[in-house]
Image (spheres, rainbow, N blue to C red):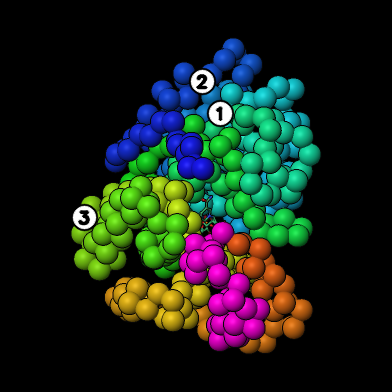
Amino acid sequence: MFRNFKMVSRVVFGRGCFNQLDDILAEKRGDSDSFIVFLVDDVFEQSRLAKRIFAKNKDFIIWVNVDDEPKTAYVDDLTQRIKGYAHRLPDGVVGIGGGSSMDLAKAVSLMLTNPGSSADYQGWDLIKNPAVYHVGIPTLSGTGAEVSRTTVLSGPEKKLGINSDHTVFDQIVLDPELIAGAPADQRFYTGMDTYIHCVESLTGTYLNAFSKAYGEKALKLCREVFLEGGVDSDDKLMMASYCGGMSIAYSQVGICHALSYGLSFVLGTHHGIGNCIVFDYLDEYYSEWVDEFRWMMEKHGINLPRNLVAGIEKDQLEKMVDVALVLEPLWENALGAGWRKIMTREKIKDLYQRM
Ligand code: NAD
Ligand code: ZN
């Protein structure tokens, strides 16, 4: 069966296009009591961007904190706050920030219309009801969260996305000016997420012409951004993230992402830096790409943390392996149908213990 891929319905791209948000939302607004919820990364609370959010009278701005990557409990809490704010659903949920804030917006828009806890929906196609209209506005580029059909959440048991057609944004606003102020190291880590998406898609067994077309373009853009630079780097990085996301949407990620999820679940390591830490130990699987990645790190003066796993408890290491092994499609994409024979628990432990 071929995947009938649900894509973002509307995209606006260009420097300054954030100013069009008001007009875009105007079409969705109902009567005078209706409102829109803005979930905005709290890093922007005192910023110029905050003043540019055209919130109307009844609109609800929530400054979200992403010091920890999104948890199901936080999504449930935000959903309850919005339900308590008005006795009706909002006309829209707008997420402004990096992958974490966009994922919070996706998850909240789903949980406003689906009963129970967001932890109940971690998995594939468990969501029954369509979400509230939702808009994603990236302020960091690389995760591809703006185009993906998932919102990645850590729950009580596992780190796993709510994967569904309803998760996909209805609208995204891609304004390269919004990513200009990101700290250089964070920009690199999140940018490398795209680079690694491309590598894992292009070297995977699930590769097809659709994924290849987007993956190759995104990879070329990553190289231009991180090896050459230039005045239009932010525009290119934003499109690399978009194309990298499109590439994995029709294939899959691989070993680096599987191991990075384990790190993140047990140690709280953030996605971008976690991927970089893991990728640096994957010469055996992605050799020349790892060399190129190291070259990019050197060029950008990046020093990765070391010996993260060395001192952890035995049961924490076992949990890390469990979390990584749950992600079966990632292993199958990377290593083929016989992956279990290649990637044993011992092998995964050995890789983790070197990090
Ligand atoms: P992030 O959203 O976690 O943000 C990282 C840090 O950068 C935060 O401290 C944030 O406040 C800050 N920040 C964001 N934009 C900024 C700006 N313009 N200026 C200054 N600071 C800024 O980082 P990310 O790497 O974009 O996202 C990682 C998250 O995305 C993880 O939670 C991961 O699980 C998720 N993810 C989701 C998908 C998906 O398809 N849904 C894919 C990959 C990763
Ligand atoms: Zn990723």
Marks 1 and 3: in contact by CB < 8 Å? Answer: no
Of label 1 and label 2, which has the lower sequence position?
A: 2
Judged by depth in the image, the label closer to the viewer, 1 or 2, is 1
Residue in the image at 37% along x and 78% along y: 287
Judged from the image, the secondary structure of the residue bearing numbered disc 3 is loop
- Mark 1 = which residue? 133
Instruction: Say above or below: 142 vs 34.
Output: below
Q: Is residue 299 left or right of residue 304?
A: left
- Mark 3 = which residue? 231
Q: Is residue 354 magenta?
A: yes
Q: Quadrant of residue 83?
A: top right
Of label 3 and label 1, which has the lower sequence position?
A: 1
Residue in the image at 43% along x and 63% along y: 204
Q: Provide the major secondary structure of the magenta segment.
A: helix
Q: Give the percent coordinates (x, y) of residue 329.
A: 56, 59
Question: 260 or 57: nearer the eye?
Answer: 260
Labelled disc at residue 28: 2
Categorize mark 1 by other alpha carbons within 10 Å: few (<14), some (14-19), many (20+).
many
Disc 3 residue type (three-letter): Val
Q: Quadrant of residue 331?
A: bottom right
Question: 109 or 282: nearer the eye?
Answer: 282
Q: Is residue 299 magenta?
A: no
Range shown magenta:
329-355
Q: Alpha carbon of mark 3 to alpha carbon of mark 1: how far?
A: 34 Å
Res. 79 in view: yes
Categorize mark 2 by other alpha carbons within 10 Å: few (<14), some (14-19), many (20+).
few
Disc 2 residue type (three-letter): Lys
Q: Give the percent coordinates (x, y) of residue 250.
A: 44, 48
Marks 2 and 1: in contact by CB < 8 Å? Answer: yes
Q: Give the percent coordinates (x, y) of residue 186.
A: 44, 64
Question: 166 or 134: nearer the eye?
Answer: 166
